[in-house]
Amino acid sequence: MKTQKTKALWLAMVAPLFGTPVWAQGLTDEVIVTARKRAENIQDVPIAVTAFDASQMERLDVQSSMGLSTRVPNLLAPRNTVSFSAPQFFMRGAGRAENNWNYENAVAVFIDEVYLQSTAGAYIDMMDIESVEVLRGPQGTLYGRNATTGAISFRTRKPELDHTRFMADATVGSNGRMDGKVSVSTPIVENELGIKLDAFRTSNDGYATLVSPAGAKEDDDFAEQEHRGARLAVLWEPEDGQSYQLAIDGSKQDNGTNLITPILPSDPMNFLSKTGNSDWAPLYGPSLGTAEPLLNGGGAKFDGLNAVFKAVVDTSLGTFKSITGWREYDDTYRAQLGSFPFPLQVAPGASIWTFVDSDNDFEQFTQEFQFAGKIGEELDYVAGLYYFHNQWDQMQYVGALLPIEFSPVCCFPGQTQKFGGAWNDTAQETESYAVYVDGSYALTESLELIFGARQTWDSKKVDYLSYFEDQRTVIPGFPVNPDKEWDEFTPKVGLDWHVTDGVLLYATYTKGFKAGALEGARATDPAFASNWLAPEIVDTYEAGVKAQWMDGRVTTNLTIFTSDYKDKVDLITPQAAAVADVDMKGLELDFSWTPVDSLTLFGNLGLLDAEYKSADPDHPIFEGYGIPGNAPGLDAHPVAAPEYTFLVGANWSMPVGDVGTLELQVNLSGVDDHYSGLGVGNFDSEIVEGYELLGANLSFRSASDTWSVTLGGENLTDEEYWATTMFGFIPGRTYGDGSTWYLRLRYDTN
């Protein structure tokens, strides 16, 4: 996949950017972030961080957490191949392709400072989200386990204490898109007690179309989506230096089936090719697929409820903060993977359909105590205690397990045919404790020592029971009840140097770790259901320069890094994983330039070089699922690690008399060829081809900035592209949307 052409493209993109001073967020105003658990100018934070406020997300039409994909250097968030509610997050080439109960993601996601263990709850509809901060690189000191490659922090807007605010937002668009949002915030006791209520509903007809085995279109709404939710927040500030906030929110998702488009090679003899020469095409066409017989009543539902309580008290020694979080959800889906019009006949009466039926019950509790303060004029610090508890129960049927299970019983409930699958009834309890400190010490007026450390203790217990497809007969060797404990110390050390008021240089070493996991998510072999994988460890060295020029009109934030991953885990079948040591090296650049008040140029660039250093002998890069030939060995490409991602764009505004302002925004984003998150086998069918997407919108904003109307579009060139693929032995794709448009009317009293 590496070619002289792509290397030339790197140079062509990087060269002009180094000649153009660069950015933090596309605004000349100061951007405040809380990446280090204290409010700071983004230009003073020695971390690679990209931040968006609500207006920027609106201009980029970021509808959910998945909309951050390619908006941030080296970040991918493609649609999940099975479950609508669980976005895939990959940052700097590491992440998780599936939302399995036994594996956490290497990209930690937070809402209002509360960690989300499962990405099933991380499909976040942007309901009055005040800001998003994306921190790249290990964040283990302050953000804990599973932030080995970065963290994404969403913050909702607080209730108003000094005025009443009303916001309403309505959007219509392509594919039957209809979004509605409303927010009301008002003080109950002025400057002391306030309340806020948010509600939203979003829906569309979906991106996929169901066809008959003959290819005739049957249902354009097969992958329809409907999300709705509400949030109540109460803020009490009885006196200066005291703040108490309680927020309760609930959300529901009622979605169709996440249809996978089946693909076939032009040459059947190249079905398992790893040479890069196999030409694959959709069987029926992009985003078209058939329904398998087990899919009757298919679809996906999500029902979640969350509560967060925060208490902040200033004392003479510093600021004390308590964060208590509780989350629970039910997540069910009945989905297919390949959507072929025929089963694979493996024996008389035994056929395999690539089918998943899953029911998840999830409950999580977290408690964090923080204390932030100063000692003298030199030392700033944050210290804390953290507790996490999670219970995740799952009942799941998979109709195509490898190795193939020839069920001795008949049959899947409601069927008369054997399908070679199995039911897995699992319950995992996770408990984690941590103590941490993070801070900086001023060695001189311009030079600071950066330090941090976290000690974490983890434990997991699993009850694992697997049945044949009749859901009654227990598979030999089950049940199993494995349990495991780990502890890990993750330090951070570095220097930052304020060369001038507008230039910061920094260099850091950071260690991160992702919690150990049970290997078999959906296992029919008790060996996989009992095998604990070691925690994933990463050592990252990072250096950066943040600079502002021309009175803040130009900002350039540049980061270079190298990360050494040990025991990095990739899923290779529904019940087995592959472990390898991987090196990641790269460069990241955020920039903006406001040459005149009416025009801002902005963008980012991420470059990544990923390579295997070592791997288990049974890793697919050596033996390719037991298929001889074309095994790339250590020359294989790690998954979800494109050589580049980029975003470039411009915001232009023009006053329209005394009535208001006309604004035009244009952006182009893109990503290079890469293997999908499930493409560890490096089959040709697992390659996601690079693509570029053009978006634009035109807005009119009233002079008072209370109302606006926006006409916009995405993928304006109607590029045919896909963002994810399936395992090479279950060839299929999830396509992206074609050209779409939307019209938004917004009213906000601010």
Image (tube, rainbow, N blue to C red):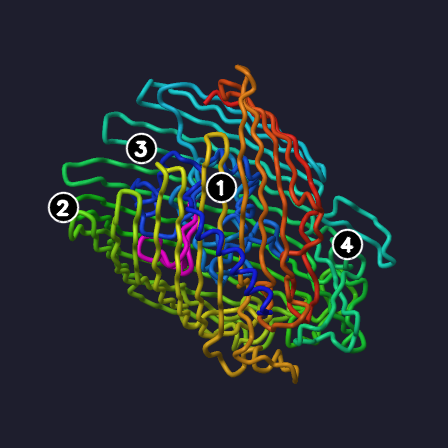
**Between tags 2 and 3, which lies in front?**
2
- Residue named by callout 2: 375
Q: Can residue 100 be seen?
A: no
Tell me, yes or no, whether the two marked residues, 4 and 3, touch with CB atoms within 8 Å.
no
Against 36, residue 582 (above or below) is below
Name the residue: 40% across, 47% down.
Answer: 556
First of labels 1, 4 by sequence position: 4
- Indicate whether residue 666 is drawn in magenta: no
- Residue type at mark 1? Leu
* Mark 2 surroundings within 10 Å by alpha-carbon count, few (fewer than 14), some (14 through 19), many (20 or more): few
Q: Secondary structure at mark 1?
A: strand
Q: Which residues are magenta?
A: 133-153
Residue 661 x/y as whole percent: 54, 23
Instruction: List the residue tagged with mark 1.
Output: 305
Give whichever of discs 1 and 2 has the lower sequence position: 1
Of tags 1 and 3, the one toward the viewer is 3
Distance from Cα at disc 4 to Cα at disc 2: 63 Å
On the image, which quarter does residue 698 sit in? Answer: top right
Going 25% across and 49% down the picture, which residue do you hit? Answer: 499
> Which residue is denoted by mark 3 in the rendering?
244
The spot of residue 282 in percent (x, y) is 76, 60
- At mark 2, the secondary structure is strand
**387 left or right of 471 in image:** left
- The answer to whether marks 2 and 3 mark residues whose Cβ atoms lie closer than 8 Å is no
The residue to which callout 4 is attached is 288
Marks 4/3: CA distance? Answer: 51 Å
Q: Picture coordinates of residue 220 (x, y %)? A: 78, 45
Residue drawn at x 58%, y 32% as measured from the top left: 664
Front one among 407 and 695:
695
